[in-house]
Each structure stands twice: as C-alpha cells, then as structure tokens.
Image (cartoon, rainbow, N blue to C red):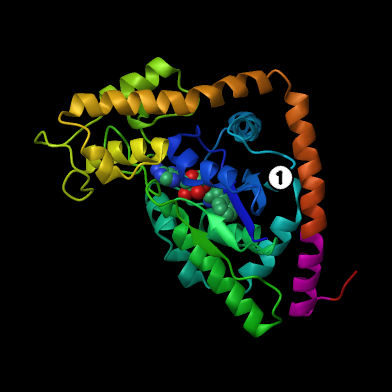
Amino acid sequence: MPRRLTGFTPSGDLHIGNYFGAIAPIVARQQAADTVAFISDLHALTLEHDPAEVHRRTLEFATLLLAAGADPDACLLMVQSHVPEHTELHYLLECVAGYGEASRMIQFKEKSRRQERVRVSLLTYPILMAADILLYDTDEVPVGEDQRQHVELARDLAQRFNSRYAPIFTVPTAVNPPVAARIMDLANPSDKMSKSAPSPAGVLRLLDPPEVLRRKIMRAVTDPGTTVAYNPEAQPGVSNLLAILSACTGTAPHELAKNFDRYGELKQAVADAVVATVTPIQQRYHDLSRHPEHVRAILHTGAKRARDLAAPKVLAAKQAVGLVPA
Ligand code: TYM
C-alpha cells in the first residue's frame, strides 16, 4: 500500500479550499492507502501568533478532520509537536539544504514581504515540512497547488541526502486534486482562498453557519458579461464557482457550465451544494466537540504510533551523517 501523508497548520480557520485540496482526498483514499494526517502546530509558530489561538485551533482542526471522515483506524491522526522526531530530522535536513533554495520558495517570498521582522523559522518552514514527509517513507502527498513547490523541495532533499550519505529516504510525489487544487477567494478571485485573508468575506469556512455561507456565495464577485463558461483566465470568478460546484458534485466544470444561463442560478446551485457538503461535517463536529477527551485520546494513540514509525528513520539518518548512536 502506498503511504499518503498531509498536514494542516492551525494558523486560521479551515475553509473549503483546505477541504477540497487535502482533507477530502485523504479521506477518500484512507482505506486504499496507509494514511497519515497531522496538525502542523510547529508551522503555526513561524509567524506572529496568539498562543491561545494555536492551542484552540489544534484541537479544533483534529476534531474537524474526524468530523470530515478521517477514520482513526485507517488514518493515523496526530499533532506534529507530539512527535519530537520531526524537529530532529528537520535539523539534519537543514544541513543538506541550501540558503538559496529555501529563500527562493514563493511562499517565503510572499509571507516575508508582509512581515516587519521575519522569523528564521519562516525561511526553514519547508525544510520542517520535508522532515514531516520524509520521516514516514511517504509516497504521495495530497496538497493544494500552493504546497507543490514545498513538496518539490522535499524531493530534492531526499535525493540529495540519499546520494550523499545513504539511500534511506523514499522520494515523495505531490498529488493535486483535479479541479480544486486552487480554490480562489470569492471576493477577490485573483487571490487564493486563504486562512490568512485580510477579510473573511470571500472565504467559505468549514464552520461558517449555512446562512453565512449562502450570503458569501450570493455576493461572490463574478466577471463582466453574463455567459456561464469555465475559463479560469478570462472568467476567474465564474470559473471558481464552477470549480467549487465541481468539487462538491464530481461533475466536470465545463459540463456544469452548460446547465446555467445566468450567474444568479449558478450561485444558488453552488450555495446549495456547499451547504449540503458542509452541514453533515458541522453536525459531526458539534457532536465530537462534546467529547474533547475522545479526540485527545485519538491524538495520543496517533503520536505513539507515529513515534514508532519515525524513531528508526531518525536513527538511520543520524548514523548516515556520522553521528555516534547514544
Ligand atoms: P495549510 O494549512 O495552509 O493548508 C492545508 C491544505 O490545504 C491546501 N489549500 C488549498 N487547496 C485548494 N485551494 C486553496 N485555496 C487552498 N488553500 C490551502 C494546502 O495546499 C494544504 O494541502 N505547510 C502546510 C502544512 C504541512 C504539510 C506538511 C502538508 C506541514 N507539513 C507535510 C503536507 C505535507 C500548510 O500550511 O498547509
């Protein structure tokens, strides 16, 4: 069975881009793949953050992953900081990564431009991500388009380490969903839907009440003209709505476009489909949040299983670079 692994950073509220980009793909194939999903809480410390919010969201994200269908018997669910091997391997990989390749990462350039004081951990963020991936002999990394470059770096570091020291890492591949790899902000369709968007108006959060989701969708920015066509370059707003509808229904966006004459009808259909997708997740989330001890127990077991997998890999990496075992 291939191993599939992906992570979620508790730095803002989960939205349907996260859901269609990574949560749904991991849940859909958890019986057919050896699946690992985790909350990358250490990654949330790379920017200015409120400790109480990181704490709250870590448990909220874990609960939402379970509510969205992650089955703890099929999917190892854990919190990154509960598995210290992630930071151990992070350091070893820093010693094969170059400053140049880290500083060329698009996300680093974008995020550092917005910061007055850039944390060193923001620069090394993708190297920690490489450690997350390489620790578990991951074959496939289901992610949205924005993480593809980071997975490429993980591939490069695995290959470099393997050829310089010893062939101990599996070289991973990024897997993007066919239509929802880059869901755009509804209020500003030239930007991707993001947890850190300056305004929530165009972000469909998984925990937004149905009426809020409907309102955001009905107010979505569309394009000049009235034809409903799937053409992300020329009609980014309408194409984004079609991509969301496609992700909800499984029908290709250009097929869906034929069913609508007016933008209003399309928006109505998107609102119905998003609410139908999100409502059962919200119901399970509210049930599960009444039992936080149950969620914590799942994370505890997940961390133990993860450490059993990760510890031999770190040991092998340490020996390969010349460290004397304790
Ligand atoms: P994060 O938390 O920003 O996003 C979680 C997942 O959601 C995807 N995503 C999107 N997909 C489609 N459309 C969008 N608008 C959209 N926005 C986000 C992301 O691509 C991601 O798959 N660094 C990662 C977490 C991480 C990780 C890892 C992922 C840490 N270690 C190892 C994979 C493997 C992050 O912050 O994702």
Residue range in magenta is 310-323
Which residue is labeled 1 in the image? 74
What residue appears at the point 17 percent right and 37 percent down from the top-left corner? 228
Instruction: Look at the numbered disc 1 and give the secondary structure of its residue.
Output: loop
- In which quarter of the view is residue 138 placed? bottom right
Figure disc tally: 1
Q: Would you say residue 325 is visible in this rendering?
A: yes
Residue 8 in sight = no
Determine crowd level at label 1: few under 14, some 14-19, many 20+ residues with C-alpha closer than 10 A.
some
When asked about the image quadrant of residue 34, the answer is: bottom right
Of 233 and 189, which appears nearest the observer? 233
From this viewpoint, which residue is outermost toward the bottom?
A: 164
Residue 122 falls within the magenta-colored stretch: no
Q: Tell me the quarter of the picture where residue 53 sits.
A: top right
Specify whether residue 312 is painted magenta.
Answer: yes
Q: Nearer the viewer, residue 31 or 231?
A: 31
Question: What residue lies at 34% left-to-right and 35% top-to-bottom?
Answer: 245
Where residue 1 sits: x, y (%)? 68, 60
Where residue 184 sits in the image (x, y, percent)?
Answer: 33, 41
